[in-house]
Amino acid sequence: MTGRLDGRVALVTGAGQGIGRAVALRFAREGACVAALDIDGATAERTAGELGGRSLAVRADVADSAAIDAAVHEVERTLGPVDVLANIGGVYGRHAPIREQTLENWQRVLDVNLTGGFICAKRVLRGMVDRRWGRIINVSSGHALGGRPNVSPYTASKMAVIGFTKALALEVARSNVTVNAIMPGITDTAMPRMYASEERLRAQGEQNPMGRIGRPEDIANAMAFLASEDGGYITGQTIAVNGGIRELP
């Protein structure tokens, strides 16, 4: 590793497993002090235990503003001001057509996938702007552009993440704070296995131009770049990390 994040404090939401865990590990290997936040405190503790150095496990629901305020306060007190925020925590929600979707499921998916990123970003932004350095990286999805039946709340939330990313980037660009989004394709985590068999995942990998589905580390590599000085002139962008299965214009 290059040590591109030496001296930085990173907060990674959804860090208990999958992409969030991979990003937390990569940030730590790049030299960052990492706070692993997850709604499941046990998984957050496991990830933090793998990080080494100065790290912290935090249990919080990203959709709970008071809980995030308390969590970030703990991070600031223990590790220091947050320089890098990776908004990865998310939920797929109930798989059903619109006519069978409940308002409760719709609201929960948007609360976590969209509002959660807003809550976390708002909480750390003032410090980033005051220090004139910061990185916020959100997670969208290929479903945002291609759509998919029966997951309309998820699709809507991930499209909205792109709009939120663009708008916030313009607000804080003069303060040397960048805001970008990563758009993964199907990635080898627990989430796609909620509704797809291993056979289906293998078939999707074979359909990909690169012959495989994504790995959490693929997303972590892109996030490490955007979080570093190397990505300092990139903002307001959505970057597809998907092996070429869906190309952005």
Image: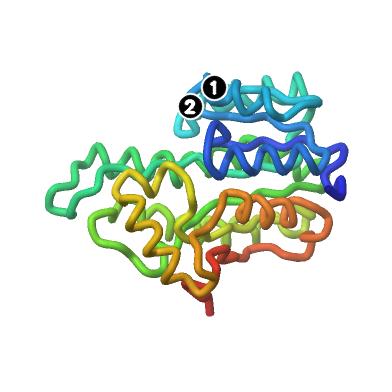
Question: Can see residue 195?
Answer: yes
Which badge, 1 or 2, comes first in the chain's sequence? Answer: 2
Q: Position of residue 222 (x, y in %)?
A: 67, 57
How far is the residue under mark 1 from the one under mark 2? 5 Å
User: Which residue is situated farthest in the bottom direction here?
Assistant: 249
Residue 176 drawn at (x, y percent):
79, 55
Tell me the tag on residue 39: 2
Judged from the image, the secondary structure of the residue bearing numbered disc 2 is: loop
- Amino acid carrying label 1: it is Arg
**In x, y percent, where is residue 169?**
64, 58
The amino acid pointed to by label 2 is: Ile
Residue visible at 41% across and 68% down in the picture? 145
- How many numbered dots are placed on residues in this image? 2
181, above or below 78, in the image = below
Q: Is residue 27 above or below residue 234?
A: above
Mark 2 nearby-residue class (10 Å; few <14, some 14–19, many ≥20): some
Pointer 1 residue: 59
* Residue 212 percent across, percent down from the top left: 50, 63
**Left or right, residue 166 beside residue 53:** left
- As drawn, 16 above or below 73: below
Q: Are the two marked residues, 1 and 2, in contact with CB atoms closer than 8 angstroms?
A: yes
Q: Residues within 10 Å of mark 1 (few under 14, many from 20)?
A: many
Left/right of residue 31 with respect to residue 190 in the rendered view: right
What's the residue at 74%, 56% (across, down)? 225
Instruction: Determine if residue 163 is in view.
Output: no
Quadrant in the rendering for residue 143: bottom left
- Which residue, as the protein is rendered here, is positioned at the far left? 99
